[in-house]
């Protein structure tokens, strides 16, 4: 049998996990991971909170819920094997009033249905035992919610890819995809190459790369930035783990929360507001093409009209550090705004349809030769190893290779 040549486009944690899983699973595969930056995990993977989500919020039985729970187990095994930090610091979702308390019960029911271990509702006194500085009537406690270093995980995945015979090409931007005979020509700025199978995990650029292959641009990526602030070192002991608000079902985003990192720093955030650059991580980042794509998309305006109260709330936290800190102080009153300093910014690849609806589940399109991961929403990083299994199975099934070329592996 001739050797199967596979290209994976996108060196975030999902693309790297897909490439590694292909190289380990398919004995005949020559797997090449293409990343346009000079390093892996340069975008969403390297600009998130580091939380390993336990699966509290997702519809029971949904693909997102199943992949999250499997992903948690695979990730813990992987970090343990590589000696990477995996800190089960725990999480509380805090209800401030009776209305939020009722919503907390619904989240608890979902978490139990999803098999989240140890999750339970605690009253005010026990909340104070878990998080002495947290305010609230009651809370949902998830003791096994964890934090990791996702760029470090991505690097270890790349090491395993290379050990399995694959390769990583950094600084290689894909500028074209086209069918030729029984394969796919992948073009870069200075070269082109023929592959039997291409899997695209392009994140913030997923709709554009799909367009290169002749696919529809929808779902469209509309970027939302999220700013984080950092507590001063003297206040890092205010939390033992993660302190979250109860999500408001009227709004699409979680709101400001308090997150411990593996390096001991404590972050407040993120907010969520339209980003003027898909890959811009400073407040001054503006890319005209990205602005035109967002504001020229009718779905964005329909979304904005339907979520005006949320937009007003988020604009206040975007414009005022004081208001940003005030959101966190609802759950952690001891936060001293004078110690808070600006932290990192992330940009979320929010998939949206023409009606302005947020696409909340996985979207995989393409053919037997090109598979596009159009949307891999949060908890994408948590679920990355399980998502890789799912995508590879899908890609091989499209080529009818799943049962003919699998490699025996104990990994």
Image (cartoon, helix red, strand yellow):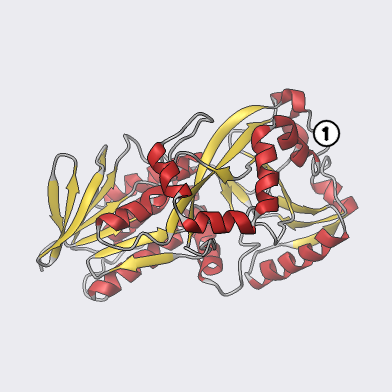
Residue 382 at what x, y percent from top left? Answer: 52, 54
Few, some or many C-alpha atoms within 10 Å of disc 1 (few <14, some 14-19, many ≥20)?
some
Foreground residue, 64 or 292?
292
Relative to 297, is 291 above or below?
above
The residue sitting at 48% across, 39% down in the picture is 276
Residue located beneath label 1 in the image: 334
Foreground residue, 264 or 5?
5
**Quarter-of-image position of residue 31:** bottom left
Foreground residue, 14 or 143?
14
Relative to 332, is 136 above or below?
below
Residue 22 at what x, y percent from top left? Answer: 29, 60
Residue 227 at what x, y percent from top left? Answer: 59, 37
The residue sitting at 74% across, 35% down in the picture is 323
Relative to 86, is 230 above or below?
above
- For residue 388, say whether it is visible: yes
Q: Quadrant of the N terminus?
A: bottom left
Residue 203 at what x, y percent from top left? Answer: 40, 51
């Amino acid at each position: 049998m001739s050797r199967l040549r596979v290209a994976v486009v996108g060196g975030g944690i999902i693309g790297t996990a897909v490439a590694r899983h292909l190289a380990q699973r398919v004995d005949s595969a020559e797997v090449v991971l293409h990343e346009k930056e000079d390093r892996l995990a340069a975008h969403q993977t390297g600009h998130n909170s580091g939380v390993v989500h336990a699966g509290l919020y997702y519809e029971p039985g949904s693909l997102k819920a199943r992949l999250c729970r499997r992903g948690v187990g695979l990730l813990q095994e992987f970090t343990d094997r590589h000696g990477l930090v995996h800190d089960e610091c725990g999480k509380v979702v805090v209800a401030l009033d009776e209305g939020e308390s009722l919503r907390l019960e619904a989240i608890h029911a979902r978490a139990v249905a999803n098999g989240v271990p140890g999750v339970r509702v605690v009253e005010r006194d026990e909340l104070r035992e878990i998080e002495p500085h947290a305010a609230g009537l009651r809370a949902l406690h998830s003791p096994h919610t964890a934090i990791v270093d996702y760029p470090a995980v991505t690097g270890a995945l790349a090491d395993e890819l290379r050990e399995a015979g694959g390769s990583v090409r950094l600084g290689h931007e894909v500028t074209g995809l086209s069918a030729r005979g029984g394969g796919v020509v992948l073009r870069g700025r200075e070269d082109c190459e023929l592959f039997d199978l291409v899997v695209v995990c392009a994140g913030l650029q997923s709709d554009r790369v799909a367009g290169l292959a002749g696919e529809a641009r929808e779902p469209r990526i509309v970027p939302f930035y999220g700013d984080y602030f950092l507590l001063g070192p003297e206040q890092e002991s205010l939390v033992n783990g993660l302190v979250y608000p109860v999500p408001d079902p009227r709004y699409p985003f979680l709101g400001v929360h308090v997150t411990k990192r593996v390096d001991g720093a404590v972050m407040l955030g993120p907010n969520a507001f339209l980003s003027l650059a898909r890959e811009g991580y400073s407040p001054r980042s503006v890319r005209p093409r990205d602005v035109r794509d967002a504001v020229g998309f009718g779905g964005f305006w329909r979304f904005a009209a339907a979520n005006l109260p949320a937009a007003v709330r988020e604009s206040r936290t975007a414009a005022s550090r004081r208001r940003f800190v005030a959101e966190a102080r609802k759950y952690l009153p001891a936060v001293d705004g004078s110690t808070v300093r600006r932290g990192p910014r992330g940009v979320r690849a929010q998939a949206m349809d023409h009606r302005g609806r947020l696409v909340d589940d996985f979207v995989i399109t393409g053919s037997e030769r090109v598979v596009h991961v159009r949307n891999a929403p949060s908890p994408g990083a948590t679920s990355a190893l399980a998502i890789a299994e799912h995508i590879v199975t899908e890609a091989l099934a499209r080529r009818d290779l799943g049962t003919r070329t699998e490699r025996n592996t104990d990994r």
